[in-house]
Image (tube, grey):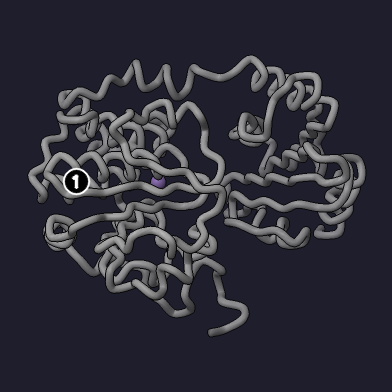
Amino acid sequence: MSDAPEHPWDDPGFSYVSNATPRELAGRLRAAESVLIVTHHKPDGDALGTSLALHRGLESIGVRSEIVISGPIDPNLLALTIPADRLERLENLESLDERPEPSLIAVVDTGAWTQLESLGDWLRARTDRVIGIDHHARGGSVAGERIVDTSCASATQVLVPVLDALDVDLATDRIAEALFLGLATDTGWFRFSSAGPEVYRLAARLMEAGADKDAIYETVEQNASPSRFAMLARALGSLRFIDHGAVAVMTLGLADFADTGANLEELAGIVNEPLRIGSVRASILLTEAESGRTKMSFRSKPPNESGSFIDVNELAARFGGGGHVHAAGARVDADLDEAFRQLEGKLEGSD
Ligand SMILES: [Mn+2]
């Protein structure tokens, strides 16, 4: 294996495309004695929604399944789980050697080794027993059989034909709600360009099957804690611009955490706020929650009309971190002021 693959989340030369039909994956699922469902580290609404919809769908036809998720997750998303869901949270996706061997493993909303963390080795030994359901353009050889449909706005949309092939009634056990969660959150509540007629048609079908859009919206989007809002206000108050206004930098320090009582998990999404500013091409949030250790979160906009964009994966790599072209992270042994100076230095040096 090469030490430096072209993209860290690809197998070099691997073509990440569908090699199975919904009917074929349905057949594998129906025949399974037990299905373990996993998704990417730090699950978002689509990762959780796809996992829950598949889990509830399988249970409804008598196939035992369970979900294992890892890393931080927005507590508002978890509020949509129900007591009957078999869902286990792990700190990290490590080996699952200690648990009973599942007869089938479903990896949803990702097919990228890097997003599955140290679970990779465990999965590599079981590739022929792994199926994948995804809508991302990049991925690796995680699943022996997979559906990768990049025309779908969410992984939940990719899952629907599989559930249909299993004759699952979407109106039972809040399956429609879980599917709607992924569809709504991955399209920015139907605003993004990915939300075409098919997405609206599916949304209508899910609402007819019982998904309560207003209730889901309120639970997920209008449920922030006062401490999160206090941190948002402080982050916006700290906003500075570098690189002639193209890069927005916000900082949150030890005093901010102490004064508000907020924790890191409550800060999800705050880094995106400055991207609303027209001149801003990238946004960076520096957080020092632990003295002398600063977390850097990077986001950037897609290419503009002239095709230019800021590759934050490359920027994060200069601090020993990484991620994706438009979303990345790093950690440095420095306080906020020092981290800001280092960042300024690297951005000026890159001109
Ligand atoms: Mn997704």
Q: Which of 117 and 213 is in front in this view?
A: 117
Pointer 1 residue Cβ closer than 8 Å to ligand 1: no
Q: Residue at x 83, y 50 (%)?
A: 343
Q: Which quadrant: the C terminus?
A: bottom right
Mark 1 surroundings within 10 Å by alpha-carbon count, few (fewer than 14), some (14 through 19), many (20 or more)? many
Q: Can residue 169 be seen in this view?
A: yes
Pick the residue in front: 256 or 198. Answer: 256
User: In which image quadrant can residue 346 be found?
Assistant: bottom right
Q: Is residue 294 left or right of residue 181?
A: right
Identity of the residue furthest to the left in this view: 167
Q: In this view, does 340 lie above or below 212?
A: below
- Residue 322 appears at what percent x and percent y? 65, 59
Residue sitting at x 42%, y 37%:
45
| Side (left or right) of 176 relative to 351 | left
Residue occupied by mark 1:
58
**Quarter of the rendering containing residue 101:** bottom left
Q: Does dot 1 land on a helix, a strand or a loop?
A: helix
Relative horizontal placement of residue 226, taking residue 122 as reference (left or right): right
| Picture mark count | 1
Residue in the foreground of this view, choosing between 102 and 78: 102
**Residue 330 versus residue 231 in the image, above or below:** below
Q: Is residue 215 above or below residue 344?
A: above
- Label 1 is placed on what type of residue? Leu
Question: Residue 258 at what x, y percent from top left?
Answer: 80, 24
Does residue 137 appear in the picture of this structure? no
Spot occupied by residue 193 in the image (x, y as percentages of width and height): 39, 39
Residue depicted at x 40% and y 68% = 123
